[in-house]
Amino acid sequence: MEYELNETDFLVSQTDSKGNILFANEDFCKIAGYSLDELIGRPHNIVRHPDMPKAAFKDLWETVKRGNIWKGYVKNKTKNGGFYWVFATVYPNMACEDGQHGYMSCRRKASIAEIKKAETLYKTL
């Protein structure tokens, strides 16, 4: 079942260099269906939907590891097996306590038109 974000929903998470979650805000926890304790230390791909092409995440990781910002549409899965679409902006940063590079992802509602374009594109990857 699809969860449609509200216009005011703003999902934020931060990971270490390996993609393990260091921080997740209340909107992310609520929409994904996990408590903060269930997310901290887990790989961010805990919310990766199987419909998402591997090429999209390959591009994401290659982009942020070069120190650039990545933007794109992502279909994520919820803890209860549902899904939700977001427009994601992923930032490279130096926020980890151990001095390693970390990443921050900020996500907002994607429009129906944006989702349809992403679905069409992702079928070609």
Image (cartoon, rainbow, N blue to C red):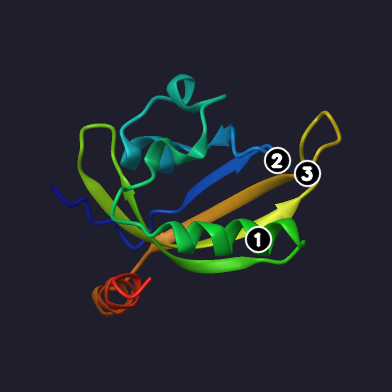
Amino acid on which the number 1 mark rests in the picture: Glu
Q: Label 1 belongs to which residue?
A: 62
Amino acid on which the number 3 mark rests in the picture: His
Depth check, front residue: 26 or 63: 63
- Is the residue under label 3 in contact with that under label 2 (CB below 8 Å)? yes
Residue 72: image x %, image y %?
48, 68
Q: Label 2 belongs to which residue?
A: 17
Q: Residue furthest top?
A: 37
Residue under the point 45% across and 40% down: 45
Question: Residue 124 appears in which quarter of the rendering?
Answer: bottom left
Left or right: where 94 falls relative to 81: right
Which disc number belongs to residue 101? 3
Residue under the point 35% across and 57% down: 52
Depth check, front residue: 114 or 52: 52
Q: CA distance from mark 2 to mark 3?
A: 5 Å
Depth check, front residue: 119 or 33: 119
Residue 110: image x %, image y %?
34, 68
Residue under the point 54% across and 25% down: 40
Disc nearer the start of the sequence (3/1): 1
Label 2's element?
loop
